[in-house]
Amino acid sequence: MVVSADYRLAPEHPWPAAPDDALNVLLWARARAPALGCDPGRVVVAGDSSGGNLASVTALRAPELVAGQLLVYPPLDAAMATESAAAYGEGHFHTAAHMAWYWEQYGGDPAHPHVSPLRAPDLSALPRTLLVLADCDPLRDEGLAYARRLGAAGVECAVHLYPGVFHGFLGLPLPAGRAALAAAADWLRATARVRRA
């Protein structure tokens, strides 16, 4: 069962409209899971790019309600002060300038963990996580840093880093995209066997 979250968009609806909407969708899905023939203890939040940010923030806000989080090249720190942001900030489809503009429209305090999940002081309550990352992406190092922090906090975390591809590759007819989708599906099936109360 897939529930696709429709959330309000910035700049017309700045932060925290989008993460509030995402959390409300999680609460809605959990409450209706039995009627939909689903187990509420096996809910996974997932998203790519900005959706990955919203999924990670939702898991931070209600970790007890999710069994896993699948994050595909998510923006996790509004500071963007990484080597990959400098190395791949231009010429690889998704630019650092694009990201800076998106963050400006989004609003919110860049240091707030519900804007920049990488800055959350404690990640130990989070569920098992899969990060799907593109090697030639300004956001790559944020994802890798988040994975390291999750591991250090005792959270089961897997990283699938795909070489030679850029932000957005999952939606393109590329061999790496097909491989990433298949691997993510395998991870989801395994995660569905791990029930969270």
Image (cartoon, rainbow, N blue to C red):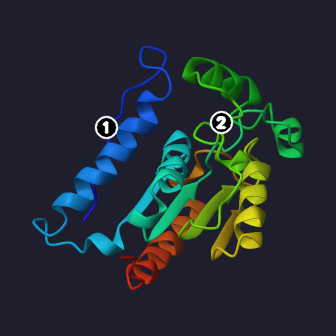
Q: As rendered, which of 184 and 92 lies closer to the eye?
A: 184
- How far apart marks 2 and 1 lie (CA) works out to 23 Å
Q: Is residue 167 above or below residue 43?
A: above
Q: As rendered, which of 89 and 81 lies closer to the eye?
A: 81
Q: Is residue 35 left or right of residue 64?
A: left
Crowding near pointer 2: few (<14 within 10 Å), some, many (20+)? some
Sequence-wise, which precedes: disc 2 or disc 1?
A: 1
Q: Which amino acid type is shown beneath numbered disc 2?
A: His
Q: Is residue 189 left or right of residue 187?
A: left
Q: Which mark is residue 74?
A: none
Q: Is residue 30 above or below residue 184?
A: above
Q: Is residue 140 left or right of residue 56?
A: right
Residue at (63%, 77%) from the top-left corner?
Answer: 156
Residue at (37%, 27%) from the top-left corner?
Answer: 8
User: Quarter of the image containing the C terminus?
Assistant: bottom left
Residue at (13%, 65%) from the top-left corner?
Answer: 36
- The residue tagged 2 is 112
Q: Which amino acid type is shown beneath numbered disc 1?
A: Asp
Residue 191 appears in the picture as rendered: yes
Name the front one of labels 2 and 1: 2
Q: Which mark is residue 6?
A: 1
Q: Quadrant of residue 5?
A: top left
Residue 4 appears in the picture as rendered: no
Residue at (38%, 43%) from the top-left corner?
Answer: 22
What x and y, as percent, mark residue 92? 74, 38
